Image: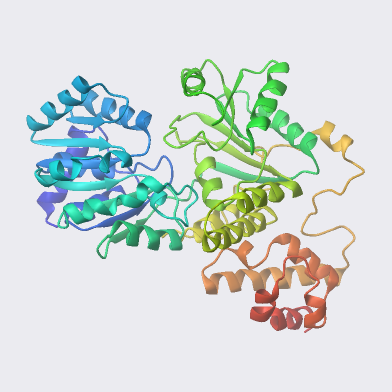
Amino acid sequence: MGVDFIENINSTLKQKFEMPSFRLGQKEIIESVMNGHDVLAVMPTGGGKSLCYQLPAVMQPGITVVVSPLIALMNDQVVSLKDIGINAGCIHSGMSVSERKNVFEEMVNSESFLLYLSPERIQKPGFASWLQKQKINLFAIDEAHCVSQWGHDFRTEYSQLSLLRELKPDVPMIGLTATATPLVKRDIIEQLGLKTPDQHVYGFYRPNLYYQVEFCTDDDEKDGFVIQALKQTPEGRVIIYCGTRKKTEKMARLLSQRGESVAYYHAGMSSKERTLMEKNYQRGHVRILAATNAFGMGVDHPDVRLVIHTQMPGNIESYYQEVGRAGRDGKPSTCLLAYSKKDKGLQSFFITQSEAPRRVKVLRWSALNAMVQYAEGSECRHGDILTYFKDDQRIDSCGHCDSCDPSSLRRVSKPEKSFQKSKTKKKKEALFEPSMSGDEKWRVEVIREWRKEYAKDNDIPAFMVFSDKTLRDLVLRAPTNLEELSRVYGLGDKKIEAFGRILIEKLHP
């Protein structure tokens, strides 16, 4: 790609989009698109994915077809593009015949045009014959993880998008998603029919976020952490994720009784009720929103200072996407996960009740186990997340998570009331327990160092080797043979076969 062309990209960014510079990864992705390559781009929520197809769209004649799952998101993007003088429109079920006709007229009269469509629209009678007659310069598939059965938000309507490749085999395609493991990336490539795509994974490191995980004995203790977190975060928006619809309403009542400005959001509400709640939150009429995971996709508020999970999500992809709604303005924000033993039971119930094929359920169980291990202990929350998603950037220690900086002022303090209420119950254990002998503390360091090296050699997060909870149990039991090792918490047959003898040697040199 020549110097002049790169200069054109830079000038288009400034003149058309009124942006002074690219964010991490955007320029590299855009260059791949402009070279006519298929592309798979993985950038976290708030990373600026939309520019990666919008800028190429205005630099070349023809229509850029953007597939997006949310009508509200399509409408917002079209309004934003028109505000800066870029030709764009969307076609969806909520429009009248005359409104759709106007979009097609604008398209005919525009040298370049961004057309937003829902995945269902692709299947409509007549769409294929219309598309074949058009000059299409790019297909952009937003929320591309929805095409994969291994993803956390699979949608059947996405499974037919390979039709676009069949109709226009020579038109480049870009799939964009906020979270995708290597397995999901492979599936996206296969399902969309991407041809040896350029793969870009950027921006999973969010240095302004403080990650914190707290084990709670019961819901009362969780509520205590929520109340304490709100005390420490008097300004900015707050999202509180709850595992069930009932819990969102209960949380909203609890906080309302304490004088907080709060609303709730879940899929059991009518469309009109959800829209009203969204507007009240967006306009700042309420500061706090208690919600299930039905709230999230397409949400873009820059000043979310606090994201709380009162129940553990079913996988790290969902967790990361949800905490990613915090601090999009780059300012310090806290992400607190308050979990308990029964959280795994709730997620297990969701998996067993699912009608998904057995192979999908097996992977969901594996994803849930990874989430549990992450919650039970990590070398560095940010570092392990980067490794989990295979980000190009890796770090050993972030300096701003509960593992790296447990005394941070950003950490949500232990609520006194909850502490008193549950003081007779078992507390979350520190990695080093006061009752440990000198030899046991030495073993903790030896095993911890071995875990770090093993994780690095195999390019996996440390928590996926085993969690801190397993590490403590391993050291305290100090097994001398494989049978004794099998009694250690969190060590199954596969892990014992892979490195069981090495652990025994490390424990008893």
Residue 244 at x, y percent in the picture = 64, 36
Can residue 208 be seen here? The reply is no
Residue 162 at x, y percent in the picture = 28, 54
- What residue is drawn where x is 68% and y is 32%? 247
87 above or below 395? above
- Quadrant of residue 114 within the rendered picture: top left
Instruction: Identify which residue, 306 or 360, lies in the foreground.
Output: 360
- What residue is drawn where x is 19% and y is 20%? 98
- Most extreme residue toward the front is 125
Rendered-image quadrant of the N terminus:
bottom left
40 above or below 454? above
* Residue 340 placement, left or right of 465: right
Rendered-image quadrant of the C terminus:
bottom right
Residue 267 at x, y percent in the picture = 54, 31
* Residue 475 placement, left or right of 201: right
* Residue 180 placement, left or right of 433: left
- What residue is drawn where x is 62% and y is 48%? 350
- What residue is drawn where x is 34% and y is 49%? 176
Instruction: Identify which residue, 499 or 207, lies in the foreground.
Output: 499
Residue 328 at x, y percent in the picture = 45, 36
- Most extreme residue toward the right is 424
Instruction: Identify which residue, 295 or 46, lies in the foreground.
Output: 295
